[in-house]
Image (spheres, helix red, strand yellow):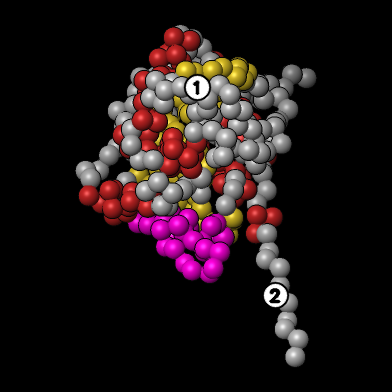
């Protein structure tokens, strides 16, 4: 009797498509992406970090702007990529659904002889990414707070309020974002996490227990993951719970919920990547920044500019 061939696995990412909020829209002012620049690191001697800065069209140097820092920067702003964050920012800032916001797209550290990460090669094998992003110590937090922020503050008027600062990432970039805020809630309090690697790569599976054992921190977190993320299967078929991305993200949700964190989450059927989370970035951003300042002044010239032009009298 011939053995039946197993059915090919369905690519569940096919069900996630970018919506209009992630596309360039006619009539919406476009922000400018400056860079890339290079930031030498003292936290990781001998390395540097490439980064680019998004400056929205509405930025006024006289008014403090919000800030969002995105790990694995090139993948987040790839024009044909799965995130296209620059379009999301253009659209949501223009519609006043999020505050005027500077955004930084930073890559993991590399030696000068190593290539810069790209939207296709995020740097796991060519940069310092595994150590910087997956280890739970505060060294990467120092890159952001002690090395990057002073440079940004010299160039831009960024709000000093930690409620006006957020961090974002996918996979190892997501746990890196969480780790920065975990160590420095005095600087950053909003976290956007897509398929976060809260697994045992460098001890990330310990976070639920750390959350349970620690005093609640003033963080707001949005988690996204899919049931077809990496599920901890080893080549021989043995299951490793600590390397199950979806399971560990659910553990994070339960730990944060039990502690009373300001939390939102969405579980879908996506795989390990940005397809599912990329499509959700606009809604994640609206939720994270839902309490930004709203003008009710009838004489606010910005608000008035959204009104339809008056019809001419006949």
Q: Position of residue 137 (x, y in %)?
A: 33, 37
* The N terminus: image quadrant: bottom right
Question: Callout 2: 10 Å neighbours few (<14), some, many (20+)?
Answer: few
Whether residues under marks 1 and 2 lie with C-beta atoms below 8 angstroms apart, the answer is no
Residue at screen point 43% across, 31% down? 166
Quadrant assignment, res 269: bottom right
Residue at screen point 47% across, 12% down? 156
Q: Is residue 23 left or right of residue 244?
A: right
Q: Which residues are magenta?
A: 227-254
Q: Position of residue 109 (x, y in %)?
A: 50, 28
The foreground one among 265 and 171 is 171
Quadrant assignment, res 307: top right
Mark 1 or 2, which is nearer the eye? 1
Q: Position of residue 82 (x, y in %)?
A: 65, 41
Can the viewer see residue 120 in this picture? yes
The foreground one among 200 and 298 is 200
The foreground one among 133 and 45 is 45
Quadrant assignment, res 124: top right
Residue at screen point 31% across, 34% down? 183
Which residue corresponds to mark 2? 6
Q: For mark 1, give the secondary structure.
A: strand
Task: Give how far apart the Cα atoms at labels 1 and 2 are.
Answer: 47 Å
Q: Position of residue 143 (x, y in %)?
A: 41, 25
Question: Callout 1: 10 Å neighbours few (<14), some, many (20+)?
Answer: many
Magenta segment: does it hold 96?
no
Can the viewer see residue 63 in this picture? no
The answer to which of marks 1 and 2 sits earlier in the sequence is 2
The foreground one among 79 and 60 is 79
Which residue corresponds to mark 1? 48
**308 above or below 12?**
above
């Amino acid at each position: 009797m011939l053995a039946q061939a197993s059915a090919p696995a369905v690519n569940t990412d096919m069900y996630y498509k970018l919506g209009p909020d992630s596309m360039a829209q006619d009539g919406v002012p476009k922000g400018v992406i400056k860079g890339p620049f290079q930031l030498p690191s003292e936290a990781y001697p001998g390395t540097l970090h490439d980064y680019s800065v998004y400056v929205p069209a509405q930025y006024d140097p006289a008014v403090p702007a919000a800030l969002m820092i995105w790990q694995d920067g090139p993948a987040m702003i790839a024009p044909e990529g799965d995130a296209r964050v620059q379009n999301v920012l253009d659209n949501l800032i223009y519609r006043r659904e999020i505050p005027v916001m500077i955004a930084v797209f930073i890559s993991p550290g590399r030696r000068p002889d190593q290539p810069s990460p790209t939207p296709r090669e995020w740097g796991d094998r060519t940069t310092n990414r595994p150590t910087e992003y997956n280890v739970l110590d505060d060294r990467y937090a120092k890159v952001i707070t002690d090395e990057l922020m002073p440079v940004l503050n010299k160039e831009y008027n960024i709000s000093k309020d930690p409620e006006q600062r957020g961090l974002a990432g996918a996979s190892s970039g997501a746990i890196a974002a969480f780790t920065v805020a975990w160590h420095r809630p005095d600087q950053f309090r909003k976290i956007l996490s897509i398929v976060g690697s809260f697994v045992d790569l460098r001890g990330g599976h310990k976070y639920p227990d750390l959350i349970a054992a620690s005093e609640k921190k003033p963080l707001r977190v949005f988690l996204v993951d899919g049931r077809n993320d990496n599920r901890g299967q080893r080549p021989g078929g043995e299951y490793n719970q600590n390397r199950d991305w979806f399971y560990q993200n659910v553990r994070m949700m339960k730990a944060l919920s039990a502690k009373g964190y300001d939390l939102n989450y969405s579980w879908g059927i996506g795989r390990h990547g940005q397809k599912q989370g990329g499509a959700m970035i606009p809604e994640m951003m609206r939720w994270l920044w839902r309490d930004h300042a709203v003008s009710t002044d009838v004489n606010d010239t910005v608000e008035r500019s959204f009104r339809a032009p008056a019809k001419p009298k006949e």
